[in-house]
Image (cartoon, helix red, strand yellow):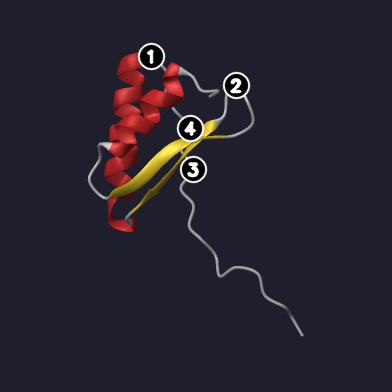
Amino acid sequence: EVSSPELDLLADVANSCEGVFGSRMTGGGFGGCTVTLLRRTQVEAVVATLAQEYQRATGLTPEVYACEAGPGVREDA
């Protein structure tokens, strides 16, 4: 397992939030990031909680990128 205390913190905090289906570390090697799947209605609350807890523990502000799934692959005629 290749992770860090900071990534573990982000995943643990996210997994404790209401509306989160799951969060885990991802990426290639040291550094990486977390991916969190959650209800759209909970995005603002989860981001606020992550930022607050991460800053409290590390003194740093995390970068958060909110994304949503697209329609997937299709063939254009």
SS at mark 4 in the image: loop
Whichever of labels 3 and 1 marks the residue nearer the N terminus, that label is: 1
Identity of the residue drawn at 25% across and 36% down: 16
**Mark 4 = which residue?**
63
Left or right of residue 28, residue 56 in this image: left
Nearer mark to the viewer, of 2 and 3: 2
- Local SS, label 1: loop
Name the residue type under label 3: Tyr
Can you name the residue that lies furthest to the front here?
1
Look at the numbered discs 3 and 4 and tell me whether their residues touch, using CB distance below 8 Å: yes
- The residue lying at 45 percent from left, 25 percent from top is 7
| Amino acid type assigned to the residue bearing label 1 in the image | Gly
Q: Is residue 36 left or right of residue 45?
A: right
* Residue drawn where x is 28% and y is 34% of the image: 49
Q: Is residue 8 left or right of residue 49?
A: right
Residue contact between numbered discs 3 and 1, judged by CB atoms under 8 Å = no
Looking at marks 2 and 4 on the same chain, the residue that comes earlier in the sequence is marked by 2
Name the one closer to the observer, 35 or 67.
Answer: 35
Asked if marks 2 and 3 touch (Cβ < 8 Å), the reply is no
Q: Amino acid at mark 2?
A: Phe
Name which of mark 2 and mark 1 comes first in the sequence: 2
Q: Position of residue 36 (x, y in %)?
A: 41, 44
Q: Which residue is mark 2?
A: 30
